[in-house]
Amino acid sequence: MPPHSRLLDRRQWLTRALAAALPGSALAQSVNLLGSRIGPSTTAQTIALEAAPALFDLQPHATTPGFAFNGTAPGPVLRLRKGQPARLALRNALGEPLSVHWHGMRIDNAADGVAGLTGQPVTGGGTGEFSFTPPDYGTFIYRPLVPGRTAELTGQGLSGVAIVEDPGLPAVDVDHVLAISDWALTDKGQPLPFAPGPGRLGNVVTVNGVLAPARLAVAPGARVRLRLANLSNARIMRIRFEGVRAYVVAVDGQPTDTFEPLKATLPFGPGHRFELVFDMPPEVGSKAMVSALIGQGFPLAIIETAGAGRVQTVGRPAIAPLPPNPLLSESIKLQRALRADVTMQGAGAEWSINGKKGLPQSDKPLFSVKSGSPVVLALKNESAVPNVIHIHGHSFRALHPFDDGWEPYWLDTIIVPAGQTIRCAFLAGSPGLWLIGSTILERLDGGMSAFFEVK
Ligand SMILES: [Cu+2]
């Protein structure tokens, strides 16, 4: 086939994909679309996303201008299948370049969506097509990653949750996403100005695009799986579970041995995901609550038993772990690891790693390593505030401070307290240039990023 006609085919495919995913009128009406609710789930391996200006109803008697994927913020929950190629058709109806990064997914580097590092962004008014194959089950985040512009693009509403669906074992009665965002708004609902700084903390918290708390009615005795994702630009919170015994079954998308969090609380930085399973009490009107420990405690979600239906709880097995991910090695030969420091510094609007500003200025990798080789990074936070650091395309283990033991879960994002060092270990994944960057997006834009090369 001559290249000319192949190009036409690609264009035709893109148009068809967009037409299939968006009702005919949605493309034309995407401006002035009133809807802050999370979009309906899609299960297609062909994902059509349109990023466009939108209006949200986040406060009474006010509309908030922002940006939306397919008309909502967060965008639709994307449900993908493990090991099967997914195709993204992206229409960028904004006036500036846009990329889509699949936060936490260990996919090919070319699909990682770091503008200027792993590929080129889609220009304003343009379209692009990307394909990737998710290797792991789990809960992930999609959002723009355009160095210098990520904070504003995301803070205006562009982010969403992507789920790679597992077989649903052990079985639960309810599987529900809680996507948490915070918005910095005036009392008239207008976004406060975006400016470089240490991080934009919101004053309006939404869960799945509606004002917190989200309310969920389930059958008495229901076994519930909650998938929490922190989509906020900068908000590090502690979350607490009340009214039930909640067990963590996955951290940052990867299954873990189940554990009950200490004092029923978890640290929850931007970019983190947790999956929890718990059993609701058998009585009608019982409540469970997920709250953020902000101020006196702030309810994010209230789950209440209602209705005449009753789940069969007699003889039900205890809450058990998800099957482990066979692709993640249980042993990493630390003695043979390449070792490198990732030193975080900064304040105000100026942030750096190892004394250098990252993308788009930096052009040299921190280190180069062969695929499959062990790597140990010392994540050193020399700033006066906690930092949240994320390694693209890899899941890592946090090592114990005084020996080479490790925490019993995998992470792709970690909170490093001020003045502290946390070491982490992983096996270098697929070839390419992988970003290490702050998930406090104002710091990412302000220079807190670097990258390494896998050969
Ligand atoms: Cu990421």
Image (cartoon, rainbow, N blue to C red):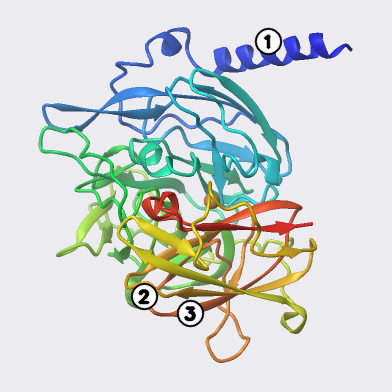
Q: In this figure, which residue is indicated by the disc labeled 1?
A: 12
What type is the residue that disc 3 sits on?
Thr
Residue 340 point in image, percent of width and height: 63, 74
What type is the residue that disc 1 sits on?
Gln
Who is closer to the viewer here, 80 or 58?
58
Task: Give the residue at x 29% y 16%.
Answer: 32
Apparent side of residue 27 relative to residue 196 in the rendered image (left or right)? right
What type is the residue that disc 2 sits on?
Ala
**Which of labels 1 and 2 is toward the front?**
2
Q: Residue lying farthest bottom? A: 402
| Disc number placed over residue 241 in the picture, else none | none
Asked if ligand 1 lies within 8 A of label 1, the reply is no
| Disc number placed over residue 421 in the picture, else none | 3
**Which of labels 3 and 1 is toward the front?**
3
| Disc number placed over residue 418 in the picture, else none | 2
Label 2: how many Cα within 10 Å (few below 14, some 14–19, many 20+): some
Please tell me whether residue 107 is drawn above or below residue 62 in the rendered image. below
Label 3: how many Cα within 10 Å (few below 14, some 14–19, many 20+): some
Residue 437 point in image, percent of width and height: 51, 57
Residue 440 point in image, percent of width and height: 39, 55
Apparent side of residue 116 relative to residue 146 in the rendered image (left or right)? right
Please tell me whether residue 423 is drawn above or below residue 304 in the rendered image. below
Q: Distance from label 3 to label 2 (Cα)? A: 9 Å
Q: Distance from label 3 to label 1 (Cα)? A: 51 Å
Task: Give the residue at x 43% y 23%.
Answer: 94
Which of the 4 quarters of the picture holds residue 60? top left
Please tell me whether residue 32 is drawn above or below residue 110 in the rendered image. above
Q: Are marks 3 and 2 in contact (CB under 8 Å)?
A: no
Disc 2 element:
loop
Q: Earlier in the sequence, mark 1 or mark 2?
A: 1
Task: Give the residue at x 75% y 54%.
Answer: 430
**In which quadrant is the C terminus drawn?**
bottom right
